[in-house]
Amino acid sequence: VIDHAPPVRERAVRRDGVWRIEVTDRLNPLREAMMSIDAGEWRQLATADGLLDGQSETLLLGEIPESARLVLLRLADAALNFETFDLGSEVKR
């Protein structure tokens, strides 16, 4: 089986000042979840269960500065399929 499908961001929910972002991949476990704010350095994100190893994960983001214009989430699976999402409009709600 050859996997060319990138990971998918399902939804983002803010609860108690922490953003919880649900991400999935159809065929492979997730291997990387990084965030960059306003083209800053990429930082690894924490997961709700403490280990980024499943096909479905919940990522945890702390507070995003009000001045942030670009909030990027980069995901990769074990087959090295990458996807980048702009969360800026969602985290500003």
Image (spheres, rainbow, N blue to C red):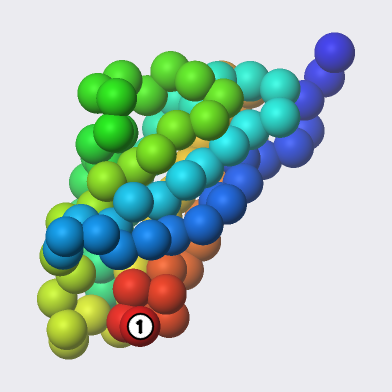
Vertical placement of residue 91 versus 49, above or below: below
Closer to us: 16 or 64: 16
Q: How many marks?
A: 1
> Who's the residue at 47% across and 46% down the image?
22
Please name whichever residue, 88 or 39, is drawn nearer the observer in this view of the structure. 88
Screen quadrant of the N terminus: top right
Q: Residue at x 38, y 61 (%)?
A: 13
Residue toward you, 88 or 60:
60
The x, y position of residue 40, in whole percent, is: 22, 63
Q: Amino acid under label 1?
A: Arg
Q: Is residue 11 left or right of residue 27?
A: left
Q: Is residue 42 visible?
A: no
| Apparent side of residue 87 relative to residue 5 in the rendered image (left or right) | left
> Residue 63: where, in percent of width, then height?
15, 65
- Position in image of residue 60 (x %, y %): 27, 46
Residue under label 1 = 93
Residue under the image location 26 percent in, 73 percent down = 38
Q: Is residue 24 above or below residue 74?
A: above
SS class, disc 1:
loop
Q: Quadrant of the C terminus?
A: bottom left
Examine the rendering and report whether any part of residue 63 can be seen. yes
Q: Is residue 21 above or below residue 87?
A: above
Query: Residue 47, located in which quarter of the rendered image?
Result: top left
